[in-house]
Each structure stands twice: as structure tokens, then as C-alpha cells.
Image (cartoon, rainbow, N blue to C red):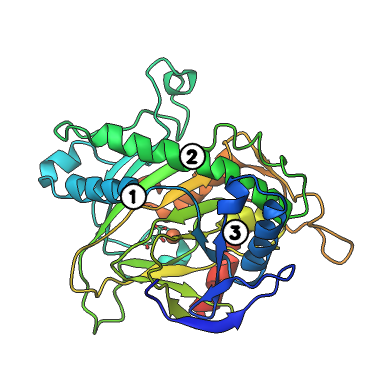
Amino acid sequence: MQQEMTSSTLSVAGVTPTMIGGEIPLIDVSNFLADKSGAAELAAAQLRYAFEKVGFYYLAGHGISQSLIDRTYDEAARFHAQPMEEKLAVKVDEHTIGYMPIQDKAPPNALAQNKKPSQNEAYFLRRERTRDDPDVVSNRRFHALNKWPGNLPGFRENVLEYMRTLEALCQKLVKLYALALDLPETFFDSSFAKPHMILRMSRYPQIDAGDDTVASLVPHTDSGFMTLLPPNKVQGLSILLPDGRWMDAPYVEGAYVVNGGDILHRWSNERFLSTPHRVRNVSGTLRYAIPFFCDPDHDTMIECLPGCASADRPAKYPPIKFGDYALWFAAQRYNHMAKVAAPADADVTPGDRATARWKS
Ligand SMILES: O=C(O)CCC(=O)C(=O)O
Ligand SMILES: [Fe+2]
């Protein structure tokens, strides 16, 4: 490992995991994935700490091969290296599938107003489907066909292999999330039997290090349940720590950076954090990112989890179907969705609450 280790530790059942940069737990799930006795409980205790205190953790022992990760980064670079007309041939649609160029204006949500747009271009994929899939036939929102580039042999196969592999890992990790929330290990299994998943392939040009008014990706929270970022040798990601400091997320060889999003925060009645983060690429080179967002299926009713409310801590949010939430969120965050009639959310989002911390 190349980052500086500190002596800061966390005591969980007598075990002291490494704290990256003194702040972010490193959770090794290899024993859990190998079904070793007691490993699930230990990893779940570390996860609980990570989500109650930070909202981010580094994931080691995940079993995803570095060669598959490298190949997927290479495919992101190959996609973005195409001429603009090839990329625009798969332009982003009302399902947020396809290519989104660097925007010329900030996203629709109120907090972004008067801000400069994020300096990155992105290509979005969701679950691969066939033409006769009933959701495709009915044009169900966010359940459409992927838009594959026409002239990149092998691209589709490589990217789908990555998505299938990450999906299988997430289906195991949700068991730890259930245990971390004091729920039965299988609690989330049905919502993740066919999870909603998004792979975003982003390219960040360099920005001017001296200009604080421009970001590669403006401070934000993610919308969903879990985001997995594979190790990135090109720095740029920073995380807003609970004490209000921005911390640059160090590269840790082999470890994913994982965070929770607004729906985990909402579902857990704000017990688990959805932590703001941002990207500034001042590395001197192009930066790529390939976040994988793994969410419950869109029929899941997001309603305060058992055990997350009490007499002094009543449920803060009305129940909402995840699909409705996802549509509302997309209408806030993406210009191409701004005109979509999204269901009104009954309350301010967890993300808006979290963003208030950096707004003031
Ligand atoms: O580029 C990164 O490291 C993070 C990307 C991110 O936060 C996002 O796409 O939501
Ligand atoms: Fe993010």
C-alpha cells in the first residue's frame, strides 16, 4: 500500500482495522466471502461504524481481479477517445442511458444555481436487456435498452462482464448491510435479486488548479444504496468529513472506495450517512472514473427500516417507491431530465440536508 498509514484505529470485537488517512475504515471482506465463521459479524460491525461515522469505506478482499478493473478503465478511455459524432450517436436519453457531453449550464436543482457545470463527460449504462423484455416493450423509465457504440469491437462484452461481476459482489455485500443495521442477513436479498444498476464511465479533463469556481464534479451526494469506485491511480476525489474538512481520498492498492447514497440514508432514517464528495482533476493528466451504482429494484418500497425508528426518533420520511425517488432525483440532477414530470417528493431529500453542510 502506498498511502500513509496512521495509528488511528477502531476497536471492533477486539479487532482493529486500518483507518485510511486516519479517517476512513478499510474493510476486508475476504473471510466473509470465503464463508469463514464469525467473518460476517465482524465485517458488519466495521460497516456499521463506517456508515454511522463517515459514509465511506475502502473495500479490500473483494475478489474482483485487477485485470478486469484495468480492462474496464481501458474501455472507458476507448469510448471517450472516439470522435464526438460517434459519441453523440448514442446521446443520453430520458432513461439516462448513453453519452452526456460536458454541460454548458449547471443542473436544475436549486443548490446548483449560479454554479458552473461539472467539467466531465459521462457515458451511462444500465442493466442489459433484450427487446422483448416487458419493461422495454412498455418503455418503463430507466428500464430501456443500453446504447452501445457501433465501432468498438469487444467493448460490450468487456463492460458486461464487469457489470455482471460487480452485481454478484453487491448481492453478497447487501447481507453485511443488513447485519450492520441489526436486520436478518437476508433482509435486502429480495430487493437485490435483480438490482437496479448503473455503470457510469466518466472522463475528466484537467481543470485550472487556481480557479476554485470550477469543479470536475461538483459537491454532491449519490442517490442510491451503494457506489463502488475501483482503485484510481489518478487523484481527484475528495470526501467531506463529518467535521467539515475536505479529505483527498488516497489511492489504496487493490481497494475500492465505497459510499452510501441518499436512499440508504433515507431508508435507515438517517442512521447511515450519505456523504458529500466532489472531484477536482488537477492531476496533470486526463482522469477516468467508472463508478458502479447498485440500487434496489425500482418496485422496492423505501420505508423506515425496522429498528431505525423509536419514540425519540420517529420516521422522518414518508414511504416512497424507489423508482419514483430515482425519477425525482434524476430530474433534479440532469438537464436532460429537467422537463420530465417527476413525482413530487413529500420532503426535502437527505442529499439536500447533507448539502446544507457545505452550502453555508
Ligand atoms: O470520480 C470519482 O472518483 C467519483 C465519481 C462520483 O462521485 C460520481 O460519479 O458520483
Ligand atoms: Fe458520487
- Residue 159: image quadrant is top left
Disc 3 packing (10 Å; few <14; some 14–19; many ≥20)? some
Per the rendering, the mark at residue 349 is 3
- Circle 3/circle 1 CB separation < 8 Å: no
**Residue at the image point whose x is 16% and y is 35% from the top:** 152
Judge: label 2 CB < 8 Å from ligand 1: no
Q: Amino acid at mark 2?
A: Glu
Disc 1 packing (10 Å; few <14; some 14–19; many ≥20)? some
Residue under label 2, please give it: 167
Furthest residue toward top: 132
Q: Is residue 317 above or below residue 299?
A: below
Marks 1/2: CA–CA distance: 14 Å
Q: Position of residue 53 (x, y in %)?
A: 64, 72
Per the rendering, the mark at residue 69 is 1
Q: Nearer the viewer, mark 2 or mark 3?
A: 2
Judge: label 3 CB < 8 Å from ligand 2: no
Furthest residue toward right: 311
Q: Amino acid at mark 1?
A: Ile
Image quarter where the N terminus lies is bottom left
Marks 2/3: CA–CA distance: 26 Å
Disc 2 packing (10 Å; few <14; some 14–19; many ≥20)? many
Q: Position of residue 341 (x, y in %)?
A: 48, 41
- Residue 233: image quadrant is bottom left
Q: Amino acid at mark 3?
A: Thr
Q: How many marks?
A: 3
Q: Can residue 113 be seen by looking at this rendering?
A: no
Q: Earlier in the sequence, mark 2 or mark 3?
A: 2
